[in-house]
Image (cartoon, rainbow, N blue to C red):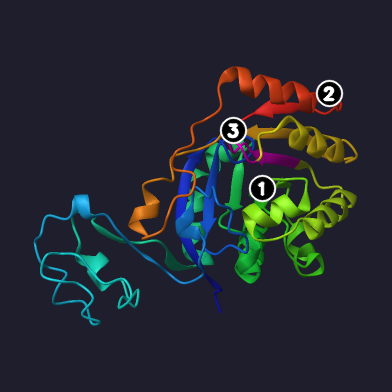
């Protein structure tokens, strides 16, 4: 039986999720709730209706198909009544109503992946499983990585590593690269801004390094939260003890998820923040590089 999973999107020709040209599969569901998340549609395991009022042309086609009576005559809807069935999104040709994710099979995902095999071979790329958090759907991740391995397609994962390592170790043995986040080195601050401490994450990084898999560490630079010299220096010092770290990547703040928040009836707590300047990025890069590791700006 083919394993199914919830996927928010499949992005082809990705250049930011590992080496070479890649296909990135975004999993739905996350066990952290970072206040700066730029993929809020991935947070819940349940599917979500995304509503963009500016795109609504008032055609009324959605009214009769909503089984919950959640849509009013003016095109607005009561999200509390919405069951997430997707009936309205299926007929909304202007794109005012969209489902955040779709349930799909490994076979369906592999059919999309195979289209770009030549690009992977020529560029040193492959497939990246991302999210959300990949290991919130560990069975689907395992099945997909195994399918890639069977066809000699390199697979990588992006993960927050907040999970039971024994449960994911079998999957990790099948990948060619692991990209992980260290957002905040202070556990209390990590809990404040993500909903969880980081003790398990740091312990899992050490166990992962012992497996000998190539690693890329990342820190999203959130103004006023993660972008302090003290935080970056502490993280870089920890990473300098890893044997299989390829490099440490500092990711400039990404404000592109802002439009998704109102579509989900959620509040964007970082709506007023702006990306760091080139000078600020260089200052943090230099601070991290002082630990003796290679540092890149993403």
Residue farthest along the bottom direction in this orientation: 67
Is residue 240 positioned above or below 276 on the image?
Answer: below
Residue density around tag 1, few if under 14, some if 14–19, many if 20 or more, within 10 Å = many
The answer to whether residue 173 shows anywhere in this view is no
Residue on which disc 2 sits: 290
The alpha-carbon separation of the residues under discs 2 and 1 comes to 32 Å
Instruction: Return the residue nearer the eye: 195 or 105.
Output: 195
Q: Secondary structure at mark 2?
A: loop
Residue 122: which disc? 3
Q: Dot 1 corresponds to which residue?
A: 154
User: What span is in magenta?
Assistant: 216-225
Does the magenta portion include 217?
Answer: yes
Residue 169 lies left or right of residue 69; in this view the side is: right
Q: Secondary structure at mark 3?
A: helix
Cα distance between the residues tagged 3 and 1: 13 Å
Mark 2 or mark 1, whichever is nearer to me: 2
Q: Evaluate whether residue 27 shows in this view.
A: yes
Upstream in sequence: badge 2 or badge 1:
1
| Location of residue 290 (image quadrant) | top right
């Amino acid at each position: 039986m083919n394993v199914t999973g919830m996927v928010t999107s499949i992005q082809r020709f990705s250049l930011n999720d590992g080496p070479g040209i890649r296909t990135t599969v975004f999993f739905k569901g996350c066990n952290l709730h970072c206040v700066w998340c730029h993929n809020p549609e991935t947070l819940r395991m349940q599917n979500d209706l995304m509503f963009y009022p500016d795109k609504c042309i008032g055609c009324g086609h959605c009214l009769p198909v909503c089984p919950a009576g959640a849509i009013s005559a003016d095109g607005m809807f009561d999200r509390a009544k919405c069951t997430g069935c997707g009936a309205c999104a299926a007929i909304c040709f202007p794109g005012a109503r969209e489902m955040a994710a779709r349930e799909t099979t490994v076979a369906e995902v592999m059919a999309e992946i195979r289209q770009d095999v030549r690009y992977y071979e020529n560029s040193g790329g492959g497939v990246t499983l991302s999210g959300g958090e990949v290991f919130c759907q560990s069975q689907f991740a395992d099945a997909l990585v195994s399918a890639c391995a069977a066809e000699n397609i390199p697979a990588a994962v992006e993960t927050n590593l907040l999970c039971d390592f024994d449960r994911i170790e079998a999957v990790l043995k099948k990948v060619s690269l692991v990209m992980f986040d260290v957002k905040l080195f202070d556990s209390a601050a990590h809990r404040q801004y993500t909903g969880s401490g980081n003790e398990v994450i740091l312990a899992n990084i050490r166990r992962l390094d012992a497996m000998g898999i190539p690693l890329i560490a990342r820190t999203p630079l959130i103004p006023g939260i993660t972008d302090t010299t003290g935080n970056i220096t502490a993280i870089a010092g920890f990473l300098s003890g890893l044997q299989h770290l390829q490099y440490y990547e500092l990711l400039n703040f990404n404000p592109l998820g802002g439009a998704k928040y109102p579509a989900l009836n959620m509040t964007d707590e970082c709506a007023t923040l702006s990306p760091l300047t080139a000078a600020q990025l260089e200052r943090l890069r230099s601070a991290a590089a002082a630990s003796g590791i290679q540092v890149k700006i993403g």
